[in-house]
């Protein structure tokens, strides 16, 4: 009979997660959470015996993962732009490809002071990343979901980032008029998946709020609304940046152009897929 050593428990648990292509990592992250250790523990202490209490707690977490729940929801945290963010089922789990939005803004706007809005901020990921990089910028994070606004505010507090505020609003409809024509940029990772997309019934997205994923008009309706509303909040010749699906680059460029934005361009993510489009508001 095998004993409950760390190595044996990891091996047996990985075998119970055949549907995950990151099974070893999943198991190590869950066990590390229960034991409150870093992942180097697994290489340093493979023969350590686990006690009943730790095993029982780990089993609870493992069962949730076997059921398909994303690791980030189980452990309640996800890193974005090297910031540890609390996550909850009320928000999308921040994705590494979304860091391209942050990178592009920092690259294009070499301004000492600037104002900008993050629409559909969720955990606050984009807003907090920008605010942490540019302490003199003033950032507003907006979400229509009240729980997301609360979560983003908690993330702001625990990261001690001061130059960002979060408010509840459906896109720009409820944003204070003091922001009208004041923004150097508006950024969003909006819902952009078509409701018939088969990916919605696979993997992590099954557990994420569909309001953060799915949009009408083949996924483009929210992008249209954001492009239109942003005209009133951007200064002339200022940046609108949007994340979108890998097949939506051309459609998004033509939406932006139809509203009078100029120089629309699409960038690829690290996987080589069209991922963000940005353009300048009319002069
Ligand atoms: N990129 C995410 C996915 O395909 C979706 C994020 C979004 O809709 N904003 O899983």
Image: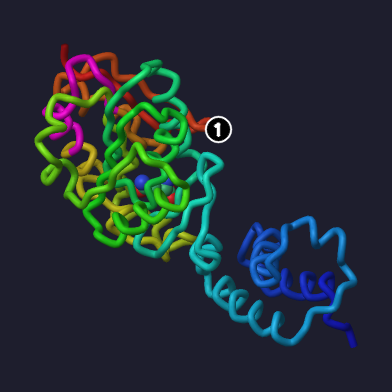
Q: Is residue 107 magenta?
A: no
- Splitting the image into 4 quarters, where does residue 226 fall? top left
Is 62 in front, or is 181?
A: 181
Counting from the top left corner in percent of width and height, residue 116 is at 28, 30
Q: How is the image coloured?
A: rainbow
Q: What is the magenta range?
A: 226-240
Is the residue 212 above or below the residue 184 in the image? below
Give me the residue at 28% from left, 47% from top: 166
- Splitting the image into 4 quarters, where does residue 136 fall? top left
Is the residue 102 above or below the residue 171 in the image? above
Counting from the top left corner in percent of width and height, residue 97 is at 49, 39
Give SS at disc 1.
Answer: loop
Give me the residue at 30% from left, 50% from top: 194
Counting from the top left corner in percent of width and height, residue 143 is at 25, 50
Is 139 in front, or is 93?
A: 139
Quick one: which residue is furthest to the top in this view? 283
Is the residue 3 above or below the residue 159 in the image? below
Classify 10 Å Cα crowding around label 1: few (below 14), some (14-19), many (20 and above): few
- Residue 10 in the figure: left or right of residue 16: right
- Residue 166 in the figure: left or right of residue 26: left
The residue identified by callout 1 is: 270
- Residue 179 in the figure: left or right of residue 245: left
Q: Quadrant of the N terminus?
A: bottom right
């Amino acid at each position: 009979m095998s004993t409950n050593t760390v190595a044996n428990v990891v091996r047996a648990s990985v075998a119970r997660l055949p549907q995950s292509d990151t099974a070893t990592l999943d198991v190590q992250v869950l066990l590390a959470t229960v034991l409150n250790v870093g992942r180097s523990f697994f290489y340093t202490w493979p023969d350590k015996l686990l006690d009943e209490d730790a095993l029982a707690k780990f089993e609870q977490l493992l069962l949730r993962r076997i059921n398909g729940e994303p690791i980030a929801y189980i452990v309640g945290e996800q890193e974005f732009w090297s910031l540890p963010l609390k996550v909850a089922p009320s928000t999308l789990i921040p994705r590494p490809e979304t860091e391209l939005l942050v990178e592009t803004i920092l690259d294009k706007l070499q301004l000492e002071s600037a104002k900008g809005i993050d629409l559909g901020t969720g955990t606050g990921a984009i807003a907090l990343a920008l605010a942490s990089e540019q302490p003199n910028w003033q950032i507003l994070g907006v979400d229509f979901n009240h729980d997301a606004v609360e979560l983003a505010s908690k993330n702001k507090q625990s990261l001690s980032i001061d130059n960002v505020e979060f408010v509840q609003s459906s896109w720009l409809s409820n944003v204070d008029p003091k922001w009208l024509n004041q923004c150097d940029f508006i950024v969003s990772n909006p819902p952009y998946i078509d409701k018939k997309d088969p990916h919605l019934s696979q993997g992590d997205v099954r557990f994420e709020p569909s309001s953060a994923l799915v949009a009408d008009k083949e996924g483009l309706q929210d992008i249209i609304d954001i492009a239109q509303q942003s005209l009133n909040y951007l200064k002339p010749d200022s940046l609108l940046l949007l994340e979108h699906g890998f097949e939506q680059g051309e459609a998004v460029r033509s939406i932006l152009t139809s509203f009078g934005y100029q120089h629309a361009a699409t960038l690829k993510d690290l996987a080589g897929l069209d991922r963000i489009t940005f353009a300048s508001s009319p002069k």
